[in-house]
Image (tube, rainbow, N blue to C red):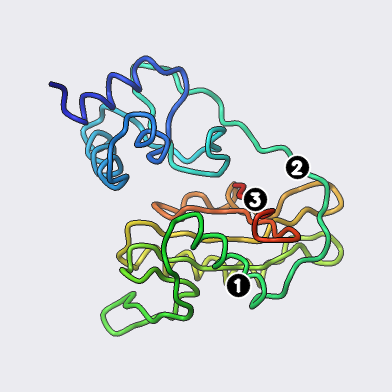
C-alpha cells in the first residue's frame, strides 16, 4: 500500500500542471489538509518537487503549487480583469462580510480583534481568528488612488499585516483584500501579489468581492 507521499509523487508526475495543497488533498482524499502541506514541504526540501506561488484555475485563487521536477512547469496564468464593481463597504463593513463568508466557507466560528503573540514581547490583534486558533485572517479594504495610482501608504500597512501573519503559528493564514480595478483594468490584488510574492511564504492572498448578499461573494486571487 502506497504512503501518502508516494501517492502525491505519482499523481504529480503524471499531471501536466501543478496542484496546490488544497486541490491535492481533495483529489487524493487525504485528510486533514495540513498533512498534504507537511508532506509537500518535506518533498520540496529533499529536492523532489518544487513549490511556487501561482494562480490556481481549480479553486480560483493565488496559492503555492506543487510541481514534480521531472515535468516542465507550465507558465503561470493571470486572472482576467473584470469590469469595475460598485463601491464597497468601509473597513468595518468589509471585515463583517469577510467574516460571514469564511465562517460558512470554512465551517468555523471567527472572533474579531483577537490578540496573538507575534514575537517575544509583541502581540498583534488580528482581524479574524477561529476558535481553535488554526485560522488567522487579516482584512484590507484598499483601493487604487482616485487617479488610479499605486496606494503606497496603504500597501505599507498590508505588508505589515503580511509580516504579522508570517510570525503567528496557525495552520492557515489569510490576507483578504478588496478586489479593485483602476481605469486601465489593473487589479490591485494581482499587482500586489506580483510585486511582493517573495514576502508571502505560507500566507494565502484572497481577492474578495462583496455582492448584494453573502451568497454573491466570490473568491479570487
- Residue 190 sits above or below residue 58 on the image: below
Residue appearing at x 28%, y 46% in the figure? 32
Q: Look at the numbered disc 2 and give the secondary structure of its residue.
A: loop
Q: Look at the numbered disc 1 and give the secondary structure of its residue.
A: helix
Residue 119: percent from left, percent from top: 30, 76
The residue at which mark 2 appears reads as: 81
**Left or right, residue 98 beside residue 4:** right
Q: Residues within 10 Å of mark 2 (few under 14, many from 20)?
A: few
Q: Nearer the viewer, residue 192 or 66?
A: 66
In front of the other: label 1 or label 2?
1
Alpha carbons under labels 2 and 3: distance apart: 14 Å
The residue at which mark 3 appears reads as: 218
- Residue 167 sits above or below residue 81 on the image: below
Q: Nearer the viewer, residue 217 or 159?
A: 217
Alpha carbons under labels 1 and 3: distance apart: 15 Å
Residue appearing at x 43%, y 58% in the figure? 107
Q: Look at the numbered disc 3 and give the secondary structure of its residue.
A: strand
Q: Residues within 10 Å of mark 1 (few under 14, many from 20)?
A: some
Residue appearing at x 81%, y 46% in the figure? 185
Residue appearing at x 73%, y 64% in the figure? 143
Mark 2 or mark 3: name the one nearer the start of the chain: 2
Which residue reaches farthest left?
Answer: 1
Alpha carbons under labels 1 and 2: distance apart: 25 Å
Residue 152: percent from left, percent from top: 67, 67
The residue at which mark 1 appears reads as: 96
Residue 38: percent from left, percent from top: 25, 44
Mark 1 or mark 3: name the one nearer the start of the chain: 1
Q: Nearer the viewer, residue 148 or 89?
A: 89
Q: Residues within 10 Å of mark 3 (few under 14, many from 20)?
A: some
- Say if mark 2 contacts mark 3, CB within 8 Å: no
Mark 1 or mark 2: name the one nearer the start of the chain: 2
Amino acid at each position: 500500500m502506497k504512503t501518502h507521499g508516494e501517492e502525491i509523487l505519482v499523481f504529480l508526475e503524471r499531471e501536466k500542471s501543478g496542484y496546490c495543497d488544497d486541490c491535492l488533498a481533495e483529489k487524493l482524499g487525504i485528510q486533514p489538509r495540513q498533512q498534504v502541506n507537511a508532506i509537500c514541504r518535506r518533498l520540496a526540501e529533499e529536492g523532489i518537487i518544487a513549490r511556487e506561488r501561482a494562480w490556481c484555475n481549480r479553486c480560483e485563487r493565488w496559492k503555492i503549487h506543487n510541481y514534480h521536477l521531472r515535468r516542465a512547469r507550465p507558465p503561470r496564468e493571470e486572472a482576467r480583469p473584470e469590469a469595475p464593481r460598485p463601491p464597497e463597504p468601509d473597513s468595518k463593513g468589509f471585515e463583517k462580510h469577510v467574516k460571514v463568508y469564511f465562517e460558512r466557507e470554512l465551517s468555523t466560528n471567527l472572533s474579531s480583534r483577537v490578540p496573538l503573540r507575534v514575537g517575544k514581547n509583541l502581540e498583534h490583534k488580528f482581524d479574524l481568528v477561529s476558535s481553535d486558533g488554526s485560522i488567522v485572517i487579516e482584512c484590507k479594504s484598499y483601493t487604487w488612488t482616485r487617479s488610479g495610482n499605486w496606494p503606497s501608504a496603504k500597501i505599507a500597512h498590508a505588508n505589515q499585516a503580511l509580516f504579522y501573519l508570517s510570525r503567528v503559528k496557525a495552520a492557515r493564514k489569510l490576507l483578504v483584500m478588496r478586489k479593485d480595478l483602476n481605469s486601465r483594468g489593473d487589479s490591485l490584488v494581482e499587482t500586489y501579489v506580483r510585486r511582493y510574492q517573495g514576502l508571502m511564504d505560507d500566507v494565502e492572498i484572497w481577492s474578495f468581492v462583496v455582492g448584494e448578499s453573502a451568497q454573491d461573494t466570490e473568491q479570487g486571487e
